Image: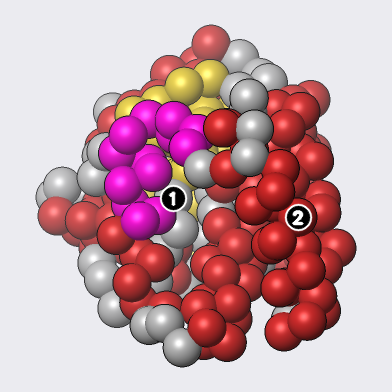
Amino acid sequence: MLKRIHVIGSGRVGSAVSARLSERGLALGADAPELVLLCVPDGAIAAVAASVEPGPWVAHVSGATPLAALAPHARRFSVHPLQTFTRERGPEQLDGAWGAVTAESKAATEQGLWLAETLGLRPFELADSARTLYHAGAVFASNYLVTLQRAAALLFESAGAPPEALEPLMRGTIENGFELTGPIARGDWDTVAAHRAAIHEHRAELDDLYETLAGATLALAT
């Protein structure tokens, strides 16, 4: 178990991580750390890691960045909290989220699992070679969900309906285990055609998105 951790970075993830480690009674700071945890943008990881004196464990919290970015450190691993973060909330954002642990040795895996559990995450091991595919899946689930909500909100605004009414619907879809309902599930192609016509008339910029999503839904979800 590590007792002294130096967290570099105080952005949305770094601030939540630091607050949680402080809650757990760990000593935070740059004096003789046992672990240097990089909570910096992906593009800065390699440069920051290279500036750290070898000796302590070095880890990052990126979902996409390979462990090679932590060179020249051999004692290295990563823990990616599979969660979206905001500065408006604190370390409770970590509670119950899954955490991807990537490591190259048994000792590193043990440290990664310990850190994930200490942060309040549900850890699972992820191969370094699978990080890009894993991160793409996370982008679909989080970033593209934002895109879908904004597209739906544009249609609601054009219809004179309140966009905030979409939120319970989106939450209900998750709570119902992503069970598909609606016209494609029913094979109601007249309604789908009506959607196409209405979108083209009022929000033509969403034509391609609707076509892509309808095709993907038919292929993947029915």
Q: Nearer the viewer, residue 87 or 162?
A: 162
Q: Mark number for residue 193?
A: 2
**What stretch of residues is rendered in magenta?**
169-181
| Residue 153 place in picture, x, y as percent | 52, 77
Which quarter of the figure has residue 208?
bottom right
The label on residue 83 is 1
Mark 2 Cα within 10 Å, few/some/many (few <14, many 20+)? few
Residue at position x 48%, y 37% in the image: 181
Q: Amino acid at mark 1?
A: Gln
Circle 2 SS class: helix
Residue at horizontal 35 percent and vertical 65 percent from the top: 167
Q: Is residue 177 magenta?
A: yes
Name the disc covering residue 197, or none. none
Q: Is residue 200 visible?
A: yes
User: Which quarter shows the N terminus?
Assistant: top left
Provide the secondary structure element on which disc 1 rests: loop
Mark toward the viewer: 1 or 2: 2
Q: Quick check: 87 above or below 125?
A: below
Q: Residue at x 47, y 74 (%)?
A: 11
| Image position, residue 112 (x, y; %) | 45, 29
- Total numbered labels placed on residues in the image: 2
Quick one: which residue is furthest to the front in this view? Answer: 190
Q: How is the image coloured?
A: secondary structure
Quadrant in which the C terminus is drawn = top right
- Name which quarter of the figure residue 170 lies in: bottom left
Give the side of residue 19 with respect to residue 143, left or right. left
